[in-house]
Image (cartoon, helix red, strand yellow):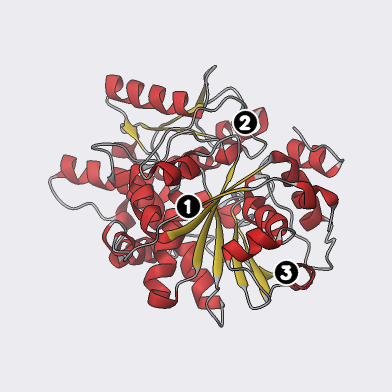
Amino acid sequence: MKDIFNTATLCHTAGNPTAAKAAFRVLSEQDFANACDEIMAWDGYTPTPLVSLDGLADQLGVARIDYKHEGARFGLGSFKALGGSYAALRVLQRQLTTQLGRDASLEEIRSGEHREACAKITLVSATDGNHGRSLAWGCQRFGAPCRIYIHAEVSEGRAEAMRNLGADVIRIDGDYDASVILAKTEAEENGWFVVSDTSWDGYTEPPRDVMAGYGVMTREVCETLEQPPTHVFLQGGVGGLAASVAAGLRQYYKDISPRVVIVEPELAACLFDSAKSGKPTTFEIAEETIMAGLSCGEPSEMAWSILTEEAADFLTIPDSIVAPTVRLLANGETGDHVVEAGESAVAGLAALIAARQDPALSDTLGLDANSRVLLIGSEGVTDPAIFEAIMAGADHV
């Protein structure tokens, strides 16, 4: 294994897993079932592959590694296609039900029956890229105007992808958290509707729908695996992906649900700091991480309520091991199936590789020759220019 993984410094703090009631209360089994029924009925739905990385598992001395590759999801390049578009549909349903004085079904909206009314309902969100692309795609399909707020470090390639889906893209000078505040403020001033993947006081329905939409991915995993994983390494961000997957696995596997390990950039470690302090904690981002989709300084309160019960471990990783992990997958360096992944997709894999070079950390995480590790490859190549630079040898983009 490359020296970069041997010398990488990972920081660890322990979680405090409890009775795991939030995995059933905050996101119910019915929430997941409703989202799965709807999304699996969409044109173009097909399960994404669960790739077995047997060669890498052998090198790392674990029983198996399964990588859920979301690059092909609805042609949008990431798992976010499941969340933002479904949440948009649910926001439109709630508004149309109020306007019509009767229940407006998801199928009616999806089929275009209310397209004229949807054209008067503007949906907005802040994004690092993938959530905004999903929202823009959903708005385009359902006929609603879409405004997306991005921060200074979001690549122009990702911005253009959202414009190509009909979104009005507004770039600000600040960071992701500043773009969230501006989206909320302008929505309140103009009567628009925020479709966010993070929750705050008084705002819970769209983030719950976003996380419920991600449940499609977890169901596909559970129905494919012959044995439950012993570990799942989940990238952080605001926590929505991690909380959804952790809850879905808990609901499916009950008492034999895998050990949940949360992985974040050391440059954006809001969940790690929350675990250390025992409450949702804001992280001051001073420098942007290469993992653009994980550059989030403030955790989702709803997601945290699940993670504080489910997560056993929190890790931070340096940016230095991200590009080498992207190249390892894309070049098939371990003899496994070639996977072209984005920077944020490989956080869990990078952490696993580095952790296995450190016997003490492996022991802390309970990793050994019997471990079966699940990884969520959350995105494919969502910015070709960045991917090409990484493949050409760049470690910072």
Q: Earlier in the sequence, mark 2 or mark 1?
A: 2
According to the picture, the residue beneath numbered tag 1 turns out to be 241
Inter-mark Cα distance, 3 to 1: 22 Å
Tell me which amino acid carries mark 3: Leu
Q: Earlier in the sequence, mark 3 or mark 1?
A: 3
Residue at 56% across / 55% down in the picture? 74
Side (left or right) of 68 relative to 103: right
Q: Residues within 10 Å of mark 2 (few under 14, many from 20)?
A: some
- Residue 141 in sight from this viewpoint: no
Tell me which amino acid carries mark 1: Leu
Labels 2 and 1 touching (C-beta < 8 A): no
Inter-mark Cα distance, 2 to 3: 33 Å
Observer-nearest residue: 263 or 242? Answer: 263
Question: How far across and down, in percent of the image, does residue 170 sit?
Answer: 50, 22
Question: How far across and down, in percent of the image, does residue 32 sit?
Answer: 36, 63
Q: Nearer the viewer, mark 2 or mark 1?
A: 1
Residue at 50% across / 74% down in the picture? 222
Tell me which amino acid carries mark 2: Glu
According to the picture, the residue beneath numbered tag 3 turns out to be 53
Inter-mark Cα distance, 2 to 1: 24 Å
According to the picture, the residue beneath numbered tag 2 turns out to be 160
Q: Earlier in the sequence, mark 2 or mark 3?
A: 3
Is the residue 38 above or below the residue 153 in the image? below
